[in-house]
Amino acid sequence: MEIVVNLKAYPCDPVEVATAAREVSEETGASIAIAPQSAHLQRVAETGVETWAQHVSPVEHGSHTGSTLAEATAEAGATGTLINHSERRLKLADIDAAVEAAERAGLETCVCANNPDQIGAVAALGPDAVAVEPPELIGTGTPVSKADPDIVTDAVAAAEDVDDSVPVYCGAGISTGEDLTSARELGAEGVLLASGVAKADDPKEALENLVAPL
Amino acid sequence: MEIVVNLKAYPCDPVEVATAAREVSEETGASIAIAPQSAHLQRVAETGVETWAQHVSPVEHGSHTGSTLAEATAEAGATGTLINHSERRLKLADIDAAVEAAERAGLETCVCANNPDQIGAVAALGPDAVAVEPPELIGTGTPVSKADPDIVTDAVAAAEDVDDSVPVYCGAGISTGEDLTSARELGAEGVLLASGVAKADDPKEALENLVAPL
Amino acid sequence: MEIVVNLKAYPCDPVEVATAAREVSEETGASIAIAPQSAHLQRVAETGVETWAQHVSPVEHGSHTGSTLAEATAEAGATGTLINHSERRLKLADIDAAVEAAERAGLETCVCANNPDQIGAVAALGPDAVAVEPPELIGTGTPVSKADPDIVTDAVAAAEDVDDSVPVYCGAGISTGEDLTSARELGAEGVLLASGVAKADDPKEALENLVAPL
Amino acid sequence: MEIVVNLKAYPCDPVEVATAAREVSEETGASIAIAPQSAHLQRVAETGVETWAQHVSPVEHGSHTGSTLAEATAEAGATGTLINHSERRLKLADIDAAVEAAERAGLETCVCANNPDQIGAVAALGPDAVAVEPPELIGTGTPVSKADPDIVTDAVAAAEDVDDSVPVYCGAGISTGEDLTSARELGAEGVLLASGVAKADDPKEALENLVAPL
């Protein structure tokens, strides 16, 4: 299982969470990436943890003030990126161009979508992974795998229909090892999580509990 | 072949073009829809021509000032709508919701996209038709079927991969009967056109020439 | 006092509300405009009521699929338009261009904003009127003139600072004659309202009650 | 004169330009800030140069994936930020919220706008500075101070009308010391420039030429 911890714009210490994630990865062999704010990429990557961006812009080098250039993201140490998170939705043509921009810069891509139909849609754009996250469950603490397990199995089926090699992650409300296990049983090959770790009093303990069943 | 004439925001007389289209439809049996500005839908529909919207908003009834409500569009006489035209690109989740809104209001849907990958993506959302329009050819007078025929055949293949029942239209640069014929030979079941008719000195003559080979 | 009734995307009968507004205008001399969906402009204007658009696009004639062209809006019978309603926020440069587009088409303009600072900002763009609407009060039934009267007086002061000839309207939560009176006492020269009329069982009665104190 | 060098998404070495700027600042006393990609803020700030962001999001700490959080920007070493650059235009309400976010994080703000009317508008939002940049001149090498000097003087007048303490910068096409001098003579208290330095073969030489007349 791939684990991506999205720090969003939370008031956490990104280096503390990154260090915890690196240690838990080393101790358990779990694959954990941290996705901080762009401005924190450099310091997060310097901890040695796998580092992801939360977003990259659908642009190439040029006159794009205020963009999040994939190449700059990679130079700061990122090796992957989320695209089209429900808190940063993109136009379809821009998802396509952002996937291309990320690939050009050597970043792995995980394109998010709300429901199984949209998972089919983004799978057609050739990303490395897709992630289904029902927006109404984000931040609730109720995992998608429990609240609406059919969304995960339908998303896996929808992705398979379009491109049977693209892994499906799931997100929204995931925080415990049990959530991870049930996501895996529903066919997910990874999870996105955020507040469960980023807002934990002890991020390392939260990550250890998360990966315990692996 | 389905023909959709998109009047965009051109300074043409929408009733004149609509009347010409209705007459050519009646005389030749060709299927021609006119897509005017929202504010012109009522008068265009009153000519008896098949009337389409250029866009509908991804919303239901409610507090949505300045939206283009699918139900209002249908009440004014539209029976179909374009969605995600390259001049009115939508977020992926909004394309999904706009298709749903249009279906709820009884409107046929044709979702546009730039290239074959994106055609696969929009086909996954269950529209009635999809349309490939390379933005760089729009308004050029050079038809996509001549400038880049592979885009059309690849789009047809991409749509078929995802949903083999969804017809593919093509657009950009189409204005003559020859363009229509070559689009059909490449597998397209319809065409979108705009300036070739909307800006013609004699829209009726332009439409007659267009449908002559059918 | 100018009264603009914004029908948003509510499931009301726009012609019924328009007819009621025209009758109440005629009977009382009150100035009441109805702002329906674009697709309903034609039928609303045909009732003889003063008709406004809810939005116009910041464009001129041209290749703008899915736009709301000011000229088309005027041709359908509108004589004014809201711009930058909090449910249809625009980029600053687009507010500027939309005001220009509306003026070119002979439409009166009322540019909305959330708070006094933003009222100062939009007053600098030269509209015919500005309207302050705190988004948190929209649709609540609690009038801005009661919930936060300082917003209205501060907005009037902010507009005056920048251009002392531009009238300030207020909106959000307004539904009764008492609300209208207190808006006027705070310095507003008009009101925007929506659900109070559009969702009323008897729109004519709602409008009569509204204008009674005038 | 304040000088802000916007590196946009140009393929330059941000540390090289930053080092050159710091050296020229030290040697000449000129005030030069470098605005790199977010992901480069940390390394640019570590050179000791004054560091600015190209954009900050109109958000507070919270669930805002893919945002550019003002606090993270400041933690990486930025002390100021551009807002509403013509390549990253914001909704009016978002300019207001971004100025507030930047102030909360202790960042200086310079809000950009296209023309004198819009300069008046953004001055009403209380930023530390405003910058007029006619988009059609960006990247042309023809300085606004030569192509259209009235834009600068009118912008200075428009800002003064609204808030006579807010300094006006100007940008677009500026690259030489002569451009800087004429901007100053027209009333500008700072300049934004980009390609003239970022794309120079020798950024240090370009900066030295720029500040020579100061």
Image: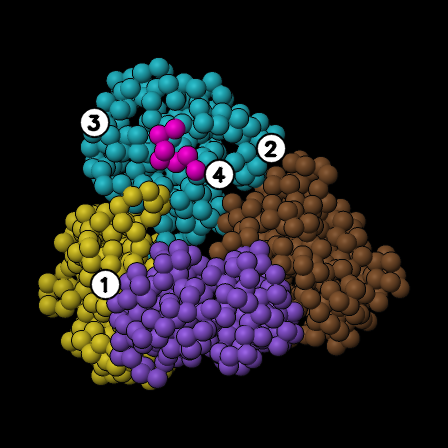
Chain colours: A purple, B yellow, C cyan, D brown
Residue drawn at (23%, 67%) of the image: B127
Residues at marks 1 and 4, CA–CA distance in whole angstroms: 35 Å
Q: Secondary structure at mark 1?
A: strand
Q: Which quadrant of the figure has residue B154?
A: bottom left
* Res. B135 visible in picture: no
Q: Which mark is residue C113?
A: 4
Q: Are marks 3 and 2 on the same chain?
A: yes
Left or right placement of residue B182 versus residue A27 in this view: left
Residue bounds of the magenta highlight: C136-142
> Tags 4 and 3 in contact by the CB under 8 Å rule?
no
The chief SS type of the magenta part is loop
Q: Secondary structure at mark 3?
A: loop
Residues at marks 1 and 3, CA–CA distance in whole angstroms: 36 Å
Instruction: Quickly name the residue at label 3.
Output: C202
Instruction: Quickly name the residue at label 2.
Output: C162
Residue drawn at (67%, 59%) of the image: D75
Q: Nearer the viewer, residue B54 or A101?
A: A101
Q: Position of residue D141 (x, y in %)?
A: 68, 65
Split into 4 quadrants, where in the image is the C terminus of chain A? bottom left
View extreme (right): residue: D27
Sequence order check, earlier mark of 4 and 3: 4
> Tags 1 and 4 in contact by the CB under 8 Å rule?
no
Q: Secondary structure at mark 4?
A: strand
